[in-house]
Structure formats: C-alpha cells, structure tokens
Amino acid sequence: MLKGKITISRPTYGGGKKAILIEVTDSLSRQRFVSVEMGYSDFAEAITGMGEVPVSFELRNPERVGLKKVSEDREVFAPERHCGRKDYEDWLRDNCQEEGWILNPYLGAQNSIVYRGNGRPMLRYSVYRYVKPEQLEGE
C-alpha cells in the first residue's frame, strides 16, 4: 500500500464560486497527483455517508506515483557575459540538460548566481529524477 497525504481546503475563487478542493500527494515522489473539486453541498453529502457524489478532478503525472524523487545540486560556469536571470535560465535549458534527469533551471533563489574572483558567473541549479525505491538500496 502506498503512503501519502491529503489536503482539504476552501480556495478563494473569483466570481463568488464556492468549492472544496481535495488534493492527494504521494509521499515518495512528493508529487501532488490528484486534485478533486466539489461544491459545499456535495462535500457535505460525501462526508455524511452519501455514495458516488459527483466531482471534477485532475490527474497529474500518475506514472510518478510510488517512485522516489531524487534531487541533486549542480554548478556550472556561464558564458562570460552579464545578462538577466531569464537569459541564464534559458542558457541552462539549452546547455545543461543531462540524460535521465529533469533540469530545474530556476535561478531566483539567493546564491543561485554567484560571481567568482575572475568575475565569471557561476550558476547553481538542481536536477531531479524519479526512481523505484529498490533502485536506491544498491547505491
């Protein structure tokens, strides 16, 4: 049996829409893979025992459920030029994608872009992948 977490909230929508949002997150992958939305009265019926209450739901990346998310940090010198964060993120996408990993090019955190003594920018970013938990036991 897989383990996860559930969050039930009352989001604020424009136009007076009132709904309950139920989200389920897989503990291994840390992936929020299902979001269920329903009206207040339907939610009340469901928690008081009514079966098969209608809902709208979104399923995201079900292939990641039950897999372990593995993240690693990376550093790389960028081209010797001053440009904006967005340009550096685009450069990472174009030049630093590794086979078998998903590149996270976000550089908005403090110390994501540092300048070494020679004035050359070093970019600090991360990569991640999803693996079967038993694959980690051998590492």
Image (spheres, helix red, strand yellow):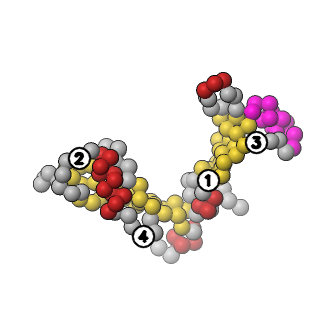
Q: On the image, numbered disc 4 is attached to which residue? A: 99
Residue 36 at what x, y percent from top left?
70, 43
Which image quadrant is residue 20 in? Answer: top right
Sequence-first tag of 3 and 2:
3
The answer to whether residue 80 is left or right of residue 109 is left
Are the residues at dot 1 and dot 2 in contact (C-beta closer than 8 Å)? no
Q: CA distance from mark 3 to mark 1?
A: 16 Å
Question: Mark 4 belongs to which amino acid?
Answer: Glu
Determine if residue 70 is in view.
yes
Question: Mark 3 belongs to which amino acid?
Answer: Val
Are the residues at dot 4 and dot 2 in contact (C-beta closer than 8 Å)? no
Under circle 2, the secondary element is loop
The answer to whether residue 15 is above or below residue 8 is above
Sequence-first tag of 1 and 2:
1
The answer to whether residue 52 is above or below residue 73 is above
Which circle marks residue 55 in the picture? 3
Which image quadrant is residue 109 in? Answer: top left
Q: On the image, numbered disc 1 is attached to which residue? A: 60
Question: Mark 2 belongs to which amino acid?
Answer: Cys
Q: CA distance from mark 4 to mark 1?
A: 23 Å
Instruction: Give the extent of the magenta segment.
Output: 39-51
Name the residue rendered at 24%, 57% in the picture.
Answer: 78
The secondary structure that most of the magenta stretch takes on is helix
Q: On the image, numbered disc 2 is attached to which residue? A: 83
Under circle 3, the secondary element is loop
Residue 10 at what x, y percent from top left?
66, 31
